[in-house]
Image: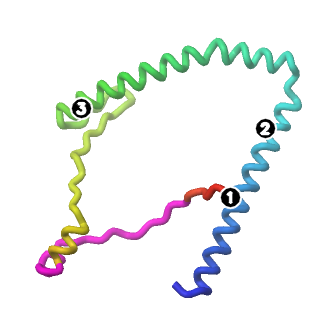
Amino acid sequence: MDVLERERIESKLFALSEYRANLAVVQMDKEAAIAQVLTDEVKAKLLEIDAKFDPRIAAIGEYISLTEGQVGAAVIEAGESVKGVGIHAIYSKGRVTWNGKSLDGYAAAHPEILAFRKVGDPSVSFRTIAEV
């Protein structure tokens, strides 16, 4: 990559970082505006609602996790997908992987194996860098 292309990408990354920062500020401003219109009475009522519903939500979440684990184990044991009411547990065979570094070395001595090599499309993921 030449210097000019790197600078263009870095410029766009800077813009992306600025957009993300602006979004965070707008979201905080929205939350602050909402907090200003909530009276102490409404805030207290919201806390009561949280106290009433949060334990139930947590308990149901635990049942969901437990049941998902049980269903997942059963589907893996059965080796096939199962469709229920509203949920389809889809079985996927284990992925086959190869030691690419070792195979590249082997291919140097046996180039005919390269006919079976497939390289996927490149991709990009974005990670936030902590400011120092």
Q: Position of residue 30 (x, y in %)?
A: 80, 41
Quadrant of the rendered structure where residue 38 is? top right
Relative to 7, residue 63 above or below: above
Tag 1 residue: 132
Of circles 1 and 2, the one toward us is: 1
| Magenta-drawn segment | 108-126
Residue 115 visible (yes or no): no
Q: Amino acid at mark 2?
A: Glu
- Which residue occupies 64% across, 55% down? 130
Q: Amino acid at mark 1?
A: Val
How far is disc 1 from disc 2 in space, using C-alphas?
A: 27 Å
How far is disc 3 from disc 1 in space, using C-alphas?
A: 47 Å
First along the sequence among labels 1 and 2? 2
Q: Position of residue 125 (x, y in %)?
A: 50, 61
Q: Name the one closer to the observer, 30 or 100.
A: 100
Tag 2 residue: 31
Q: Is residue 11 magenta?
A: no
- Which residue occupies 15% across, 74% down? 106
- Which residue occupies 42% across, 23% down? 64
Instruction: Mark 1: give few (<14), some (14-19) or many (20+) Cα within 10 Å.
Output: few
Given contact means CB atoms under 8 Å apart, are the residues at marks 3 and 1 in contact?
no
